[in-house]
Image (tube, rainbow, N blue to C red):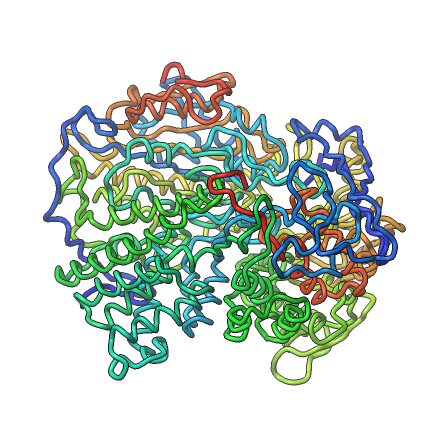
């Protein structure tokens, strides 16, 4: 038996009907493939998920909402029970969504990217000190799952080292700017006190407490003994940068009323959530000022901030980071290809291809119509002269990257770009299984299970006479393979026009390549011819759109979906995404409006979270 | 100030040497009999040496009998160490067999933890997908935890090719607390030898004292921010922040270790007076650098527990410097009958083994009492999966124990063949060799040890 990368036992489809009033997102279709059940040893119980129930037609507001006490069902709403900001009028309309349920919130440590961004915005440090920190664990494609962001001895050392270096640099090179006062004029200790208040508010993303002041004053005084005023500032600054309030996003929520289990956020906490959602960095002056002035309490005020923040280039960086991670382009620079098979692939090729995709995404999301459909189908891409030549596309105007179009039947949308095609390939040939699996798992959020234990999984060798489709004939000949690979291979074969380095070809080993493919089970029919057409299918697919929401949920909130607890937030996201004609920036906006984002569970010290 | 500005100064300065100023301050050997101390009073060390993408029996499994075994070419470099190795064949990863979902990430997560992995359930289905973490502490960290050696570095995790994440991490402090290996030898070198925050040397004593005082002040203040938050947090957050705080406290203590205050450090004969910065950035130079760093760290008693991980599972690097043109993982799926592939895999594993032999040679050159550092070290050589082909099984696994664990591993020069015993038993035996009176490791409901005959 040849390569069987994953065996599918169950395909469940989230039915996601576009349109503002029909959002039965959790309805499930199950297709069983009996011959593959051997693949499962002890799969979890099948979760026949409870749908949140049909939406109420008309989309009326459900009132201000009331915290839901776990265990009690759908209490009648008690408007006004919560402190602001709640955003009535935007609450999901399902019956079960009357009560507010934010889902679990875990304390979140900054990722390396967030650390670099934050010290840049806090101190002007552009040295990216977090690059040497240990890598995050990637979960569901992303690096920011809160539960996985824990500490290790190396990280603790690096935190101390980075804090010292960053503090030393600021004190040695930008002392007055960092302090915001002049110790010669204002007096050293008075200036230090001002620095703690003003800088501390930015570093901790909230005003200091008396406890914070004591800690900082003590370490400042200790630093003065050896290093004078500058030594004191250096140590207190380093302390802030290694403190829990800087490295983690600490939240308590607004003080809840007695007996309530859900609460809104303080303005500082909401500002912080907004800035890390949209910028993956700390709040800027404007946002902090809004928090300070309690100007984040109404929908209008929050929306104005979101609009402003989305217009900042830092928001573009966030979208780029999402796609870089989601499309497996992070680290692509180091992939290797067999130079005997692919002499055209050079050491800088992969980096150029990554730039291609990121520039394409940036253009579509921010300068084009911004829709998911456009990402999957846009009849252009971005190349520089070298990459144009590599692909056989027209050269762009100018020296750098520019927008070009070629044969749009061949190349259109994300799925036809060289980076993804090269990552999802072997070093000396294509990898139809990896490509098909990527579509199922990453683009449709379906579950694939490994092949049965003990099966011989061998990749067919490069063969000078066969096409990719012919090499995998065993997947159809062997019934045990076929039941599962029927779902994977026909997708992968549709990509065969793209070789292992993303170059387009119509023939392989002298034979015409057949790129007819099928996403078996896709609602509305899954047949396509070539990757560009597959992009068109996915652009129209409810499942694909739904999967984008799931991916942005994970990336935006740093956690996975928590089942029923997030049903209403997901409901809202999906309906709004549909209503916006699947516009990515609108999805980000909606991420800032859900229960999951606007509220949090009240902390019981030492209690379950 | 003579403090090395790490990362900036050393990068690219191949051949630079760093003086190790602590040599004068060696501790005398501790009384033997203490946990983690050899019969002759020297510290015991544990090293995990892991390769990935499975093994392939025709090129791997030794022939012959228990003592007259015949090593295959991949192990030829170990021929001089026949008496220093025990091959443990035929164990099963029992935790792997009980887990679900993706085989690769699962294999890495159960590899040294002896318990089921933490599996991501897919959206809305409850079905197991990829594993994202080991389900508990791994063997190496259990040894650190139980022996709590007062060394500069509790352990040293290094990764040659590709690491991080569930597919690339073998060492865990606990569930969801991974210790990914450092991938750049220069980073590791700077961390432990060149003025790293972790406490590498600073030549000027006054500067060193000042730096230490600064570190102490900062960490003391930083620790208070964590301490103050703890009582206000829910259980999961409290666990996370408390773990961070504990490690801050550990670092405070470690920074105060001015010299390798070891039970019986091998003094001047083993620990060099200077160390050379890693030279070259090509793969062979990096591999050599890792071995150098590890041997020196052991010789100078900077750490007693380490893992040298050579790749990640599914790592598909092309070992082009060995004349191999296909990716390792892709090749690992090929059948045993593919002689071309087996020849390439032999080259890769020979490369690993040669470095293993180099490390052992270095350790054997360090005199400790009547013996050598190798006598007081135990190296566990293993892979997360049993086989690369045949469906990625984790049954009938191949482990190799090298060194003598301070006299606890007796009768080297044997091949022990088991019939499907749980590898938890091997882990228990190893803990026992380090004077840790464990009767189980990992999931206690799995078959537990110790392993007979060992």
Of residues A582 and A342, the one drawn nearer to the viewer in this rendering: A582
Q: Residue B96: which quarter of the image?
A: top right
Is residue A604 depicted above or below A417 in this figure? above
Q: Is residue A329 above or below residue B247?
A: below
Relative side of A606 to A496, left or right? left
**So how many labels did they put on this image?**
0
Percent position (x, y) of residue B425?
43, 21
Q: Position of residue B255 (x, y in %)?
A: 23, 50
Judged from this view, the residue extending furthest toward the top is B452
Q: Residue at x 28, y 20 (%)?
A: B410
Residue A260 in view: yes
Q: Position of residue B292 (x, y in %)?
A: 29, 48
Residue A465 visible in the displayed image:
no
Query: Looking at the figure, which quarter contains the N terminus of chain A?
Result: top right
Q: Nearer the viewer, residue B449 or B150?
A: B150
Can you say whether A225 is above or below B24 in the image?
Answer: below
Q: Residue at left 43%, top 39%? A: B172
The one nearer the camera, B336 or B333, is B333
Horizontal placement of A341 versus B194: left or right? right
Left or right of residue A502, residue A11 in this image: right
Q: Position of residue B164 (x, y in %)?
A: 48, 48
> Looking at the image, is B252 positioned above or below residue A216?
above
For the point 22% across and 42% down, the residue is B301
Residue B354, by quadrant, is: top left
Which residue lies at the image location 28% right of the left edge and 58% below the top edge? B218
In this view of the protein, which residue sits in the foreground, A521 or A580?
A: A580
Quadrant in the picture for the C terminus of chain A: top right
């Amino acid at each position: 038996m040849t390569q069987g990368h994953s065996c599918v036992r169950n395909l469940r489809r989230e039915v996601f009907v576009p349109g503002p009033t029909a959002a039965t997102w959790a309805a499930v279709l199950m297709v069983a493939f009996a011959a593959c059940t051997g693949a499962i040893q002890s799969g979890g119980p099948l979760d026949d998920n409870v749908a949140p129930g049909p939406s109420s037609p008309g989309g009326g507001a459900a009132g201000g909402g009331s915290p839901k006490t776990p265990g009690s069902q759908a209490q009648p709403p008690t408007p006004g029970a919560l402190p602001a900001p709640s955003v009535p009028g935007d609450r999901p309309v399902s019956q079960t969504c009357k009560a507010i349920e934010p889902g679990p919130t875990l304390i979140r440590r900054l990722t390396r990217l967030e650390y670099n961004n934050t010290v840049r915005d806090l101190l002007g440090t552009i040295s990216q000190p977090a690059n040497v920190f240990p890598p995050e664990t990637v979960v569901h494609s992303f690096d920011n799952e809160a539960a996985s962001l824990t500490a290790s001895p190396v990280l603790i050392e690096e935190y101390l080292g980075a804090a010292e270096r960053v503090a030393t640099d600021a004190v040695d090179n930008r002392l007055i700017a960092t302090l915001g006062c002049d110790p010669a004029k204002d007096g050293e200790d008075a200036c230090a006190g001002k620095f703690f208040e003003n800088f501390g508010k930015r570093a901790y993303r909230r005003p200091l407490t008396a406890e914070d002041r004591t800690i900082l004053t003590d370490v400042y005084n200790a630093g003065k003994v050896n290093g004078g005023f500058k030594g004191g500032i250096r140590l207190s600054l380093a302390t802030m940068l290694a403190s829990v309030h800087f490295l983690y996003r600490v939240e308590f929520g607004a003080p809840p009323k007695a007996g309530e289990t859900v609460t809104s956020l303080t303005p500082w906490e909401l500002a912080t959530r907004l800035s890390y959602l949209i910028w993956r960095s700390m709040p800027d002056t404007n946002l902090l000022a809004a928090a300070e002035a309690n100007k984040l309490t109404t929908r209008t005020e929050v929306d104005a901030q979101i609009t402003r923040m989305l217009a900042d280039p830092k928001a573009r960086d966030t979208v780029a980071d999402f796609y870089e991670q989601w499309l497996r382009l992070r680290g692509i620079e180091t992939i290797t290809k067999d130079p005997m098979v692919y002499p055209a692939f050079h050491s800088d090729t992969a980096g150029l291809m990554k730039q291609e995709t990121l520039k394409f995404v940036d253009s579509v999301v921010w300068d084009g119509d911004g829709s998911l459909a456009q990402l999957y189908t846009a009849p252009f891409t971005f190349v520089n002269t070298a990459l144009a030549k590599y692909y056989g596309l027209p050269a762009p105007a100018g020296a750098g990257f520019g927008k070009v179009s070629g044969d749009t039947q061949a190349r259109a949308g994300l799925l036809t770009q060289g980076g993804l095609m090269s990552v999802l390939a072997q070093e000396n040939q294509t990898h139809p299984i990896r490509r098909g699996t990527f579509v199922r798992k990453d683009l449709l959020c379906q579950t694939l299970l490994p092949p049965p234990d003990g099966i011989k999984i061998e990749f067919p060798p490069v063969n000078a006479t066969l096409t990719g489709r012919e090499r995998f004939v065993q997947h159809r000949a062997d019934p045990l393979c076929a039941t599962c690979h029927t779902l994977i291979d026909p997708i992968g074969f549709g990509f065969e026009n793209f070789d292992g380095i993303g170059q387009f070809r119509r023939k392989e080993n002298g034979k015409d390549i057949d790129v007819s493919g099928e996403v078996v089970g896709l609602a509305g029919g899954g047949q396509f011819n070539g990757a560009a057409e597959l992009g068109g299918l996915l652009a129209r697919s409810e499942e694909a759109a739904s999967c984008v929401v799931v991916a942005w949920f994970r990336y935006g909130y740093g956690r996975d979906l928590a089942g029923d607890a997030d049903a209403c937030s997901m409901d809202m996201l999906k309906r709004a995404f549909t209503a916006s004609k699947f516009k990515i920036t609108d999805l980000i906006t909606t991420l800032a409006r859900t229960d999951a984002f606007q509220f949090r569970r009240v902390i019981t010290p030492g209690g379950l979270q | 100030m003579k403090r090395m500005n790490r990362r900036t100064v050393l990068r690219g300065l191949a051949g630079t040497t760093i003086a190790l100023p602590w040599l004068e301050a060696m501790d005398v050997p501790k009384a033997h009999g203490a946990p983690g101390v050899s019969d002759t009073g020297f510290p015991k060390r544990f090293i995990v040496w892991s390769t990935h993408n499975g093994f392939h029996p025709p090129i791997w499994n030794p022939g012959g009998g228990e003592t007259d075994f015949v090593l295959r070419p991949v192990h030829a470099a170990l021929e001089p160490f026949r008496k220093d190795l025990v091959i443990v064949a035929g164990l099963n990863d029992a935790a792997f067999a009980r887990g679900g979902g993706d085989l690769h990430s699962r294999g890495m997560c159960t590899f040294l933890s002896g318990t089921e992995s933490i599996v991501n359930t897919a959206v809305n289905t409850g079905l197991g997908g990829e594993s994202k973490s080991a389900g508990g502490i791994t063997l190496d960290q259990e040894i650190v935890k139980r022996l709590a050696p007062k060394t500069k570095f509790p352990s040293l995790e290094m990764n040659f090719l590709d690491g991080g994440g569930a597919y690339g991490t073998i060492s865990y402090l606990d569930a969801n607390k991974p210790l990914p290996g450092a991938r750049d030898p220069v980073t590791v070198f700077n961390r432990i030898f060149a003025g790293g925050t972790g406490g590498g040397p600073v030549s000027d004593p006054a500067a060193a004292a000042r730096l230490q005082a600064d570190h102490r002040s900062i960490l003391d203040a930083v620790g208070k921010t964590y301490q103050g938050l703890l009582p206000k947090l829910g259980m999961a957050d409290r666990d996370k922040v408390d773990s961070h705080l504990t490690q801050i406290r550990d670092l405070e203590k470690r920074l105060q270790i001015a010299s390798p205050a070891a039970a019986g450090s091998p003094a001047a004969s083993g620990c060099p007076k200077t160390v050379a910065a890693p030279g070259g950035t090509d793969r062979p130079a990096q591999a050599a650098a890792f071995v150098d760093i590890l041997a020196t760290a052991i010789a100078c008693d900077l750490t007693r527990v380490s893992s040298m991980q050579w790749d990640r599972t599914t790592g598909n690097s092309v070992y082009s410097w060995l004349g191999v043109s296909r990716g390792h993982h892709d090749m690992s799926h090929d059948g045993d009958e593919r002689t071309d592939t087996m020849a390439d895999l032999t080259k890769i594993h020979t490369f690993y083994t040669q470095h293993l032999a180099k490390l052992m040679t270095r350790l054997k050159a360090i005199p400790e009492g009547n013996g050598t550092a190798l006598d007081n070290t135990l190296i566990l050589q293993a892979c997360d999966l049993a086989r690369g082909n045949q469906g990625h099984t984790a049954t009938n696994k191949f482990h190799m124990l090298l060194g003598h664990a301070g006299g606890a591993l007796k009768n080297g020069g044997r091949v022990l063949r088991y019939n499907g015993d749980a590898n938890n038993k091997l882990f228990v035996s190893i803990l026992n060799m380090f004077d840790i009176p464990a009767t189980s490791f990992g999931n206690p409901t799995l078959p537990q040890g110790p392993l007979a005959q060992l």
